[in-house]
Image (tube, rainbow, N blue to C red):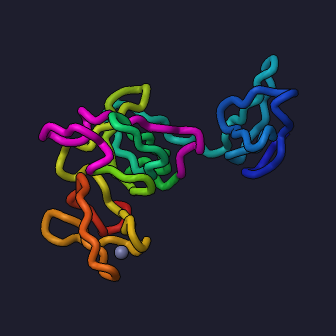
């Protein structure tokens, strides 16, 4: 059986979500177009178009969905060099020790919720690094008014309210996803 993204597959009482399947409010939906495969209780989708796998050294783009003191969780959306979107379920982990070369006490001071970051994949468990110059925040919004921040020296400035914020800024900031 073929399914399309957004098709309802079942509910969590019937199946466990495998690759290409996501859960929302107890219901399971297809995240990609492909062939539905049921193995025991697990349901997964074999995509028609192969989703790129992530390996050490790959460069990815994602959105920061949670920031704690020592880690930020990044929902990965793209692999640089691929035009296909990544599976919805891929979450990368950026640890405070992998953000920048200089010592950083709290990740919160340079990476904020909602930031779009470019990062290097460190291993298959999707640990990320933004240490090199091109890596870091490429798009960010003002914490006060929500406008898009623009580059101002080594800081980011809000063109609307003048608020100045610190980030680990990528050399590709504001250039769009490259
Ligand atoms: Zn502002």
Horizontal arrangement in the rendering, residue 43 relative to residue 172 (left or right): right
Q: Quadrant of the C terminus?
A: bottom left
Horizontal arrangement in the rendering, residue 169 relative to residue 56 (left or right): left
Q: Residue at x 12, y 40 (%)?
A: 102
The magenta region covers 85-109
From this view, report whether residue 57 is shown above or below residue 31: above
From this view, report whether residue 174 is shown above or below residue 43: below
From this view, report whether residue 67 is shown above or below residue 19: below
Residue 155 percent across, percent down from the top left = 19, 64
Residue 89 percent across, percent down from the top left = 58, 39
- Which quadrant of the figure shows ligand 1? bottom left
Q: Quadrant of the N terminus?
A: top right
Residue 81 seen from this side: no
Q: Residue at x 43, y 52 (%)?
A: 113
**Outermost residue, top side:** 40
Horizontal arrangement in the rendering, residue 103 relative to residue 161 (left or right): left
Residue 73 percent across, percent down from the top left = 44, 40
Q: Nearer the viewer, residue 55 or 117?
A: 117
Q: Residue at x 44, y 37 (%)?
A: 92
**Outermost residue, bottom side:** 160
* Corner quadrant of residue 11: top right
* Corner quadrant of residue 144: bottom left
Residue 136 seen from this side: yes
From this view, report whether residue 87 is shown above or below residue 19: below
- Counting labels gives 0
* Corner quadrant of residue 47: top right
């Amino acid at each position: 059986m073929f399914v399309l993204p957004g098709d309802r597959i079942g509910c969590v009482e019937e199946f466990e979500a495998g690759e290409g399947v996501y859960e929302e409010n107890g219901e399971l939906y297809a995240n990609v177009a492909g062939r539905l495969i049921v193995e025991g209780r697990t349901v997964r989708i074999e995509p028609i178009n192969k989703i790129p796998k992530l390996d050490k050294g790959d460069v990815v783009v994602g959105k920061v969905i949670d920031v704690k003191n020592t880690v930020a969780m990044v929902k990965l959306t793209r692999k640089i060099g691929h035009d296909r979107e990544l599976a919805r379920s891929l979450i990368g982990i950026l640890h405070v020790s992998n953000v920048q070369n200089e010592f950083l006490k709290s990740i919160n001071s340079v990476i904020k919720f909602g930031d779009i970051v470019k990062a290097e994949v460190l291993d298959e468990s999707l640990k990320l690094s933004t240490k090199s110059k091109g890596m870091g925040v490429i798009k960010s919004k003002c914490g006060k008014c929500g406008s898009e921040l623009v580059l101002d020296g080594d800081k980011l400035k809000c063109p609307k309210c003048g608020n100045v914020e610190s980030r680990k800024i990528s050399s590709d900031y504001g250039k769009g996803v490259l």
